[in-house]
Image (tube, rainbow, N blue to C red):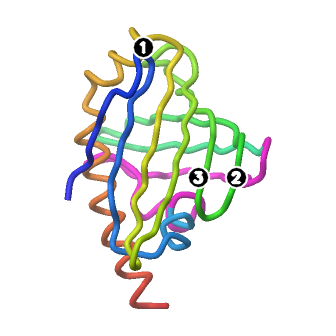
Amino acid sequence: MTVTITTPSPTELAVTRSFDAPRALVFDALTKPELLKRWLGAQGWNLVECTVDLRVGGAWRFVSQGPGGAKMGHGGVYQEIEAPSRLVYTESYDDQWFEGEALITASLTETAGRTTVHTVLRFESQEIRDVVAASPMESGINYGYARLDDVLASVSKAG
């Protein structure tokens, strides 16, 4: 299964993907460091540092390591948390590959044990949105979400 990416407004990208797992487990996989470290990252990249202070006003920070030991850090602040249905947070990158900060809203809906994650990324301008859309974002998300499928399946079997 691949992600669906749309442009609902001049400053937004929307990413939608379904997972064969209950919503509470998918929410945990988006917010718990021990699960995030198992799936988050594009091909060849792994999450090597992961801190999550899951409360409104709490910060999150991830550092990924990729080919040749390259590192990429990013983080933000949680704005809204309605577990397990909604998560709103800011995101910016240490290297500022896109200018400013994105506001990310993830909505999780469950039907018959299957969860759809609809994520809207709002940028400060259409130009920034277009820079992000032109990046290898889609392939990176697809790779990470495929790993998430495996993590969700293994956690479901263990639980």
Distance from the alpha carbon under mark 3 to that under mark 1 = 26 Å
The disc placed on residue 128 is 1
Disc 3 residue type (three-letter): Cys
Residue 4 % position (x, y): 26, 44
Which residue occupies the foreground of this view, 87 or 32?
87
Disc 2 residue type (three-letter): Ile
In magenta segment, residue 34: yes
Q: Residues within 10 Å of mark 3 (few under 14, many from 20)?
A: some
Q: Earlier in the sequence, mark 3 or mark 1?
A: 3
Residue 143 % position (x, y): 26, 52
| Residue at screen point 46% across, 34% down | 72
The disc placed on residue 50 is 3
Disc 1 residue type (three-letter): Ile
Which residue occupies the foreground of this view, 33 or 137?
137
Magenta segment, which residues?
Answer: 30-57
Q: Earlier in the sequence, mark 2 or mark 3?
A: 3
The disc placed on residue 81 is 2
In magenta segment, residue 2: no
The disc placed on residue 155 is none
| Residue at screen point 32% across, 68% down | 149
Q: Earlier in the sequence, mark 1 or mark 2?
A: 2
Distance from the alpha carbon under mark 1 to that under mark 2 = 26 Å
